[in-house]
Amino acid sequence: MSLGPLAQSADKQVLFARLGLNEQIHKLLLLEAQVARDTLSRNPLYLTDQSKADPNVATPYKWDEISETAKHLEILTVVNNARQETRPYYHLGRYMTNVNEENWVARWYLWHSFRYRDNRPRSTANNGSEGYGGGQGPYGAGYYDPARERYR
């Protein structure tokens, strides 16, 4: 059932079909990923060596500026701290490499969260609407709602 490395490019319908998701669970998975994204994108210790050396890199950090080690640790944190409702979906995404436990579901949602935060237009991001967190977030009001494929 694993999408493995291709999971990051899978569209929402494929993801929903593979995991048996509904909109409510999808939103909970997105919320958990957003918390992880915020953790990663605020701490300079999580940057790659190249990003640490670049004076133009600033918070909030982008996906490509964060080390794989930090991403991996945060993915495992998401899985270990998952809500009762989301835990079975992370279980479906669990797989082992020769040296590590991985989770393509947590990785896809974390990547997805960065993707939409990093690529959203600034004029739309500050439109005064509320985000998943219920108001002003660390990146301004508003958010991209992938379930409705539009900004709110």
Image (tube, grey):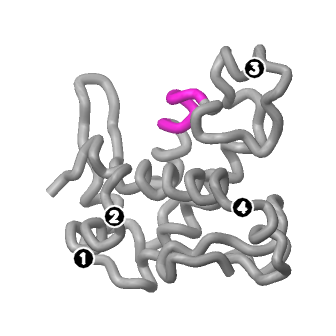
Residue 140 vertical position relative to residue 73 in the rendered view, above or below:
below
Tell us which disc is closer to us: 3 or 4.
Answer: 4
CA gap between label 3 and label 4 equals 26 Å
Q: Which residue is mark 4?
A: 121
Q: Position of residue 119 (x, y in %)?
A: 63, 54
Residue 25 point in image, percent of width and height: 42, 79
Q: Which comes sooner in the sequence, label 3 or label 4?
A: 3
Which residue type does callout 2 highlight?
Asp
> Gap in Å between the C-alphas at discs 1 and 4?
31 Å
The disc, 2 or 4, on the residue closer to the chain's N-terminal end is 2
**In the rendered image, which quarter contains the N terminus?**
bottom left
Q: CA distance from mark 1 to mark 3?
A: 40 Å
Separation of marks 2 and 4 at Cα, in angstroms: 21 Å
Q: Position of residue 36 (x, y in %)?
A: 61, 53
Q: Which residues are magenta?
A: 67-72
Residue at x 51% of width, y 76% of height: 149
| Residue at 29% across, 41% down | 5
Q: Residues within 10 Å of mark 1 (few under 14, many from 20)?
A: few
Mark nearer the viewer, 2 or 1: 2
Q: Quadrant of the C terminus?
A: bottom right
Could you say whether the residue bearing mark 2 is in a helix, strand or loop? Answer: loop
User: Which residue, as the protein is rendered here, is positioned at the far left?
Assistant: 1
Task: Identify the residue under disc 2.
Answer: 11
Viewer-nearest residue: 148 or 44 = 148
> What amino acid is labelled 1 in the image?
Gly
Relative height, residue 1 to residue 148 (above, below): above
Tell me if mark 3 has few (under 14), some (14-19) or many (20+) residues whose alpha carbon lies within 10 angstroms of its own.
some
Circle number at residue 52: 3
Mark 2 vs mark 1, CA separation in Å: 14 Å
